[in-house]
Amino acid sequence: MQHYDIAIIGGGIAGISLAYFLAPHRSVVVLEREEALGYHSTGRSAAEFTLRDNAPAVNTLAAISHPFMADPPEGFSETPLLRRRGSVMIGAKGKEERIETLYQRSKAAGASVEKLTVEAALTHVPFLDPDSLGGAYFDPDYWDIDVDALMQGYVRGARRNGAEFLQGRTLESATLDDGRWTIDTGKDQISVDLIVNAAGGWADTVAALCGVRPLSIVPHRRTAITVDLPEGIDVGLLPEINEVDEEFYFKPDAGRLLVSPADATPCEPADVQPEEIDIAYAAHHLEQATTLSVRRVASSWAGMRSFSTDRLPVVGPATDNPAFFWLAGQGGYGILTSPALGSLAAALIAETSPLKGYEQHELDAEVFSPARFQ
Ligand SMILES: Cc1cc2nc3c(=O)[nH]c(=O)nc-3n(C[C@H](O)[C@H](O)[C@H](O)COP(=O)(O)OP(=O)(O)OC[C@H]3O[C@@H](n4cnc5c(N)ncnc54)[C@H](O)[C@@H]3O)c2cc1C
């Protein structure tokens, strides 16, 4: 039976970023049930990097991750991982105060935000409906993430340091005997010292399969559609557009406009598919905020955003079994926080240092520990 120091369960961004940071220090195998890495949440995101809009601890993880993404280690990626896009926050008539509050808050936090008149908002997004727009401001600190390049960089770096990726391989059961796990994949058995649970929406399922107490990490379905824009609009130049109460957002995506109704419906872990009603909401929100009418939905999909009960990620050894390590609950920010969280998990496992931003931002990683749920 093949033995490794560590088996990471899940070949999404969580598992592969950890493999990247851990492989120089330990022998690592990543087990991914699907044939393709990143098939579930990771391959279905909106690929956005924001320094704001999340809980303070998550914003700090973003700040720690940003230097890695903006200037990755030599040889990590031939193409830039981030492309600045900027964002326009909008509020309908009646939400002027709400826009003003958020604008002032961002400004006080040091953001280079710029208040927009309706006319100025239209220069950024020419098809906004001036009759329904109540207020807007521009935030330059929004980037598109090249998720594919990020994944490839992690995987290449991990392989260079000896990590193995076994795709089409499921953890079906695992037993711990004399300090060693035997993992049964249905095809073969693997022996490891430590199991890392990076199974996204299936984090609780994998814990239960390993005899570890689940932590109530619940997947929430989120939907996205794409639509074509009328000729004459250069979609690539548009910013991302966020509704001030996160009722919807839209942004350019491969020559089309991606629209999400920002739904967050608790669901069972699965290969989730979009519901007709959420597709309709996406089109409805777009039509309400703009002068566009949606005649055809070019594509639609849904993915899982998985949250712990306090909506912060869970990183650390299980309190009921130190040979089982959680790296789960990345919600709607798992891609953008992957450098910070992957390096933190590796540091806790291999007693190395995480990305240097942790010290600089004085972030106490204990806030992510599974022990907080005891
Ligand atoms: C519509 C949408 C928009 C989003 N937008 C953004 C965004 O703009 N920016 C951002 O940072 N984040 C965004 N997110 C969130 C982001 O996609 C997730 O936080 C992230 O992908 C989670 O990664 P993961 O590796 O934990 O999960 P996943 O990518 O789902 O990976 C988990 C893997 O575990 C595997 N697995 C499960 N059980 C087993 C088992 N027993 N054995 C083997 N393998 C197993 C699964 O097959 C799966 O591939 C968005 C999500 C959605 C759905």
Image (cartoon, grey):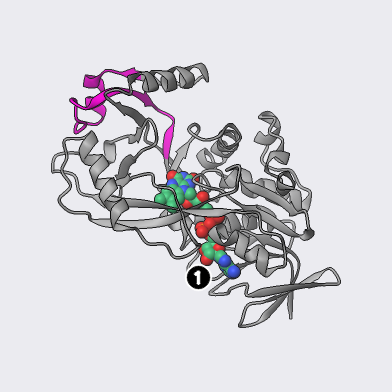
Give the side of residue 350 with respect to residue 290, left or right: right
Q: Which residues are magenta?
A: 115-143
Give the side of residue 70 with respect to residue 157, left or right: left
Residue matched to label 1: 34
Q: Please provide percent x and percent y for residue 153.
A: 53, 54
Residue 78 visible in this rendered orientation of the protein: no
Depicted 59 relative to depicted 180: above or below: above
- Dot 1 beta carbon under 8 Å from ligand 1: yes
Q: Observer-nearest residue: 285 or 374?
A: 374
**Residue shown at the point (24%, 43%) measured from the top left:** 284
Q: Quadrant of residue 359?
A: top right
Q: Observer-nearest residue: 344 or 146?
A: 344
Q: Quadrant of residue 96?
A: top left
Q: Secondary structure at mark 1?
A: loop
For the residue marked with disc 1, what is the amino acid? Glu
For the N terminus, which image quadrant? bottom right
**Residue shown at the point (19%, 44%) measured from the top left:** 229
Q: Observer-nearest residue: 72 or 11?
A: 11
Q: Please provide percent x and percent y for residue 304.
A: 47, 55
Give the side of residue 249 with respect to residue 204, left or right: left
**Residue shown at the point (71%, 49%) measured from the top left:** 370
Q: Please provide percent x and percent y for residue 9.
A: 62, 64
Q: Please provide percent x and percent y for residue 314.
A: 65, 48
Residue 343 visible in this rendered orientation of the protein: yes
Farthest residue toward the right? 178
